[in-house]
Image (spheres, helix red, strand yellow):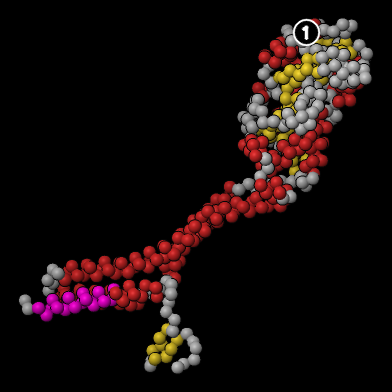
Amino acid sequence: MTQEGDTRKLGPLRIPRRIQRISWRDLVASLGPVLLVSVLAIWIAVHFVRPAPPDTIVITSGPEGSISRVTAEKYRKILARNAVKLEILPSEGSLENLKRLADPKFTVDVGFVQGGLAELVDTSDLVSLGSVFYQAVLIFYRAAEPIERLSELTGRRVAIGPEGSGTRFLALALLKANGIEPKGPTRLLDLGGQAAAQALVKHEIAAAFLTGDSASPATIRALLHTPRVRLFNFTQADAYVRRFHYLSKIDLPPGAFDLGSNLPPRTLALLAPTVELIARPDLHPALSDLLIEAAREVHGGATLIQRAGEFPAPLEHEYRISADAARYYKSGKGFVYRYLPFWLASLVDRAAVILVPIIVVLIPGMRLVPTIYGWRVKNRIYRRYGELMALERAALAQPGPEERAELLKRLDEVERTVITAKMPGSVADQIYVLRQHITWVRERLAAGAAAPP
């Protein structure tokens, strides 16, 4: 007995100690398609998966001191908790914000836009993350007695807000409905915010249109306490709401602004468009979730003109709600973002995209490999049987000596192919059965040659 090794020596020959258990060629041929499909699936997943969310968002807000600007500052602090930086771009107001968002050459991601402006700009490529708050139209005016209709401002000096502001758009729309238009007897001035308030206090104008889009809360509070300056009561609010679909009627109860001074002294009807958080469609889903979370924290409580939990809300007005925002409002944050820190969740989220094709394609495919492998091995045996049957049919045709010799030669080639083929030991029994059948066909051929003519 020789020492343990890979072969035994038997005379001049070396016989393999271990019989080959697999056919590597068939294994590669069986495994190749599965690996190819898996690699293709992973490539497609990687190609279409969204990259890691950027660490910076650019928001276009409003003038310095406006509610939009103050709100953006609150968003910045909330986003900073997740290591996301919010860059705030000041603007003249909603209209300029909308123009910036619609301009692909302008670097901006999101912005505050009040209702009613969509017809002025091509907004087909923009989406909404939801309505975030009401922005009341406040019309302050000087008069000895309250006025009930805006048409009573005809022929006077009125501040309607600067170019690019949502305040100006609303003022022009409301005044036009009352027969007051530019280049008419009424002088419409491009003043807004603090400048308009000062002009009203100094008797330089008769009325001023103000909103949170252009005026700070401090400016509005100061005007409320200014003698002989009144806040316009929209007695025709229901009619306005029916004519302007983007407006809502809000009833302001007595003392809402100041309980001690009972301001206003009676219930006032105000008009207010909703302000939406408008975004470009390529905003990363994770950042969309963070922005809606920030909006919920900032605007979710009750105020003078809204109920608790009323905002943010997926209300479709002039802009379609983005698919990511709709998903968030329906089911909240994604699973990984709900339980992991933002940076880690974004990493796991992208890694999952690679794992999905592996689980869906590669693992089931690997289970098919043994079946494919067995089919290929048996198919090679079946091909030899096909050749054998062809030779046997030829033998039944009573071939001549030369033809019979050719058939025997071909039979020898078939047997040589079977003997030299690298086949796994698991099909050895089928190989030897095949060789018995080869011997049987050879005997048939030999018997035919020995038979008398």
Q: Quadrant of residue 292?
A: top right
- At horizontal 64% and vertical 27% (from top left) the residue drawn is 316
Answer whether residue 418 is magenta in the image: no
The amino acid type of the residue labelled 1 equals: Arg
Q: Position of residue 315 (x, y in %)?
A: 66, 28
Left or right: 2, with 357 as reference point? left
Above or below, 379 against 434 in this view is: above
Q: Position of residue 92 (x, y in %)?
A: 79, 27
Which quarter of the image is occupied by the C terminus?
bottom left
- Quick one: 267 or 73, which is closer to the camera? 267
Above or below, 285 against 32 in this view is: above
- At horizontal 38% and vertical 93% (from top left) the residue drawn is 11
Q: Quadrant of residue 236?
A: top right
User: Count the marks: how many?
Assistant: 1
Which quarter of the image is occupied by the N terminus?
bottom left
Q: Position of residue 296 (x, y in %)?
A: 75, 35
Residue 41 visible from this viewpoint: yes
- Quick one: 113 or 89, which is closer to the camera? 113
Crowding at mark 1 (Cα within 10 Å: few <14, some 14-19, many 20+): few
- At horizontal 37% and vertical 68% (from top left) the residue drawn is 377
- At horizontal 42% and vertical 65% (from top left) the residue drawn is 373
Q: Which residues are magenta?
A: 434-451
Above or below, 263 against 146 in this view is: below
Q: Quadrant of residue 396?
A: bottom left
Residue 29 visible from this viewpoint: no
Which residue position is annotated with label 1? 149
Give the structural element (helix, strand or loop) at label 1. Answer: loop
**What main secondary structure does the magenta stretch of the protein show?**
helix
Above or below, 357 against 385 in this view is: above
